[in-house]
Amino acid sequence: MNESGQSAAHTAADSEQRRALLEKTLQHALDFLDSLDQRPVAARDDRDALRSKLASALPEHGEPAARIIDALVDGVADGLNASTGGRFFAWVIGGNLPAALAADWLNTAWDQNGALHATSPALGVLEEISGAWLKDLLGLPEGASFALVTGCQMSHATCLAAARNKVLADHGWDVESDGLAGAPVIKVLGSHSCHGSVERAVRLLGIGKNNQLGLDADRDGRLDPESLRAALEANRGRATIVVLQAGEINTGIFDDFETLIPIAHEYDAWVHVDGAFGLWAAASPRYMHLMRGCGQADSWSTDGHKWLNVPFDCGYAFVAHPENHRRAMSHRASYLVHAKQARDPMDYNPEWSRRGRAVSTYAALRELGREGVARLVDDCCRHAYALVTGIGALDGAELLRTPIINQGLVRFLDPHPDAGEEQHARRTDEIIAAINASGEAYFSGSTWQGRRCMRVSVCSWQTSEEDVARSIRAAASAISACR
Ligand SMILES: *Cc1c(COP(=O)(O)O)cnc(C)c1O
């Protein structure tokens, strides 16, 4: 293909070098994955240690790629959390399914731009298929529009932009043309336990956090129907969005969709559901009852990178009113889509150029199938239950919230007879730190109803019964070591 033999030889050498580099990289990746069972779950290096290995003045000259990869692997080795393994229960993280990981590698090699169907026809079609599969699996309306975004945070921003378009149009205001100056005020109503990402989306969209009202909820954070009705009544005639939760971050509770959504719709409010991990309950025959009525909402946010176990960054936005979704996002003047016309992701996404996130989603859904997703959900819930009740039963521990799905809460008690909340809080943080320092498991703290606690979240396909037993033993050792 080259006219000069020299440049052909150059190409062959390049190709040889690239192969060696990627094979070396594969080895590094396999070494890391094989080490997950033995390596400490928590990163060992602090910031200074990592900087001493990785920081320098900006290099003046380039280096050979293979040397950079080796240096990178050495430099980060003790600064990585083994969050993709089976004993990481902090925040809500999730692992990497084998097919999803492999597909994501290929995605990087293909280096496609997911903006338009034309920038990558294959990725465009994978996205159409993934969107349809996800709606089916999650019990959402077939006609809903969707977007594959960076995560649930951007999914909120996308869904609430569609909501903003609709509730302001209902009040005779075209926000896409005229902006927010002089527009009717939008009120956002939800339980006071709403995730902070909702507030960030509300700020980003110019609605303003003072217009988000935290309403009364029950002990576990379920929005109280009477307080919702009262708030809707007080704001009657206003542009209103109601935010409900499928899986509250601490307790994993679900709002009572069957009761709350019809109330919100009586007042012409838009209902958005934060289901970052909880929406996946819909995929399990055992837990789908928690989602009853949820399909009547107007938009839904969830993550792929948490419970579906695809690589970061991957979240999903679904909107029951495609025309409002397109008005909020599309750059085209016409909002008509014809059935045969290819779907341009950009018409539904806040980004322009973007990674083809459907590749790992498509691979994960094929790897698991409907049955496999249900099993993944059920297994994580079973492990969460065993962990929370197992740790909660230890001498010196207290079970605060038994998991409804995959999240639960425990805390540790200061044994001193005069100990109060402050001492229990200190003790709880001490024990969490001791478990994490042991390298055996990793948990994060949370404050729930004024009490410091340890939150347990299980969303990795890797977590096994042995991981659960080992983590309970780690908690028991931490309690005795801290006496
Ligand atoms: C994680 C989480 C979010 C934010 O999702 P990202 O994917 O991190 O953007 C929102 N809501 C809940 C309930 C979550 O657990």
Image: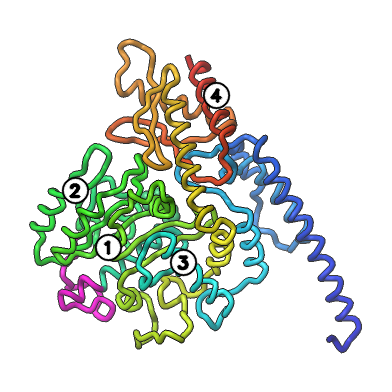
Residues at discs 1 and 2 in contact (Cβ within 8 Å) = no
How far apart marks 3 and 1 lie (CA) works out to 21 Å
Residues at discs 2 and 4 in contact (Cβ within 8 Å) = no
Q: Is residue 177 magenta?
A: yes
Amino acid type for the residue under numbered disc 3: Leu
How far apart marks 1 and 2 lie (CA) works out to 21 Å
Q: Quadrant of residue 158?
A: bottom left
- Which residue shows up at 36% across the image and 71% down it? 144
Label 2, on which residue? 215
Q: Position of residue 58 (x, y in %)?
A: 65, 58
Label 3, on which residue? 148
Judge the density around disc 4: few (<14), some (14-19), many (≥20) Cα neighbours within 10 Å. some
Amino acid type for the residue under numbered disc 1: Gln
First in sequence: mark 1 vs mark 4: 1
First in sequence: mark 2 vs mark 3: 3
Instruction: Label 2, secondary structure: give it.
Output: strand
Q: Position of residue 277 (x, y in %)?
A: 42, 51
Residues at discs 2 and 3 in contact (Cβ within 8 Å) = no
Instruction: Label 4, secondary structure: give it.
Output: helix
Instruction: Depth check: give the residue in front, 142 or 472.
Output: 142
- Which residue shows up at 19% across the image and 77% down it? 173
Label 1, on which residue? 296
